[in-house]
Image (cartoon, rainbow, N blue to C red):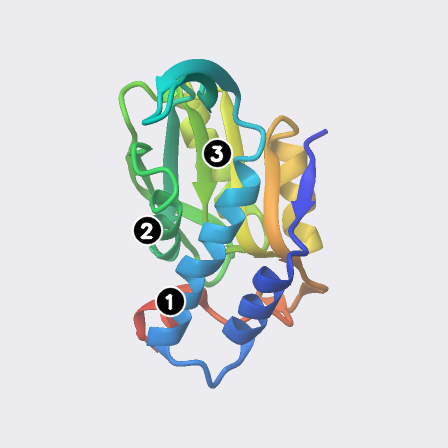
Amino acid sequence: MSKVYVFDHPLIQHKVSMMRDKKTTTKDFRQLAQEVVTLMTFEATRDLPLKDVEIETPICKGTFKMLAGEDIAIVPILRAGLGFLDGVLSLVPNAKVGFVGLYRDPDTHEPVEYYCKLPEDIDKRKVFVVDPMLATGGSGADAVQLIKDKGAKDISFMCLIAAPEGIEAMQKAHPDVDIYIAAKDDHLNENAYIVPGLGDAGDRLYGTK
């Protein structure tokens, strides 16, 4: 079974709480999203492998640690996942980027695919799928499956807020995919929104509501 990592760092919790506030402006919400995901990326990449390299400093030669050639891909789920992208790339600027387009049918609450574009060498990369919310888990699980179908084998899912129902659905569909979240909320309401949540992340990121 996959592992679920809930980040309890004070800065992450503080900034997520600010994002929950309905009075937070679109500008501030977008900035906070980038800051939170940067902090989450720092933690989520903690286990990347290192290798010893020889470097000559201005003083002398020495052996130091650098990444062991771990190739990374970031795949935001459109559209709200785009709010994560710059924050991740600020720490791993050499990562390749793919995109998966899914929307939730308002009546069935089931995900509908409309776009998928991934790096050609996705099978050789550690993939971070990013989306602000893990609610029913349908969109996240479908996105991961699309990426697996393209050959990816090492996949993690990273989001701001998750409902227990979404975590359970993701683990059931993909027991090999670890989940990184900033907060685990209480439940889903009758409209499949996370409670207490923060509303529609896409609308709040882009001011469309």
Query: Distance between the Cα atoms at labels 3 and 1?
Result: 26 Å
Where is residue 8 shown, x and y percent of the image? 68, 56
User: Which residue position holds label 2?
Assistant: 86
Instruction: Give the amino acid at mark 1.
Output: Gln
Q: Looking at the picture, does residue 72 appear above or below residue 9?
A: above
> Which is nearer the eye, 11 or 79?
11
Local secondary structure at mark 1:
helix
**The one of 25 and 13 positioned closer to us in this rendering:** 13
Q: Amino acid at mark 2?
A: Asp
Q: Which numbered disc flags the more N-terminal residue, 2 or 3?
A: 2
Determine the residue positioned at 59% across, 31% down: 177
Label 3 sits on residue? 144
Residue 99 lies, with reference to residue 26, above or below; the image says above
When the figure is inspected, residue 146 is found, relative to residue 134, above or below; the finding is above
Q: Residue at x 70, y 44 (%)?
A: 168
Q: Which residue is mark 1?
A: 31
Q: Horizontally, is 170 left or right of 67 in the view?
A: right
Q: Are marks 3 and 1 in contact (CB under 8 Å)?
A: no
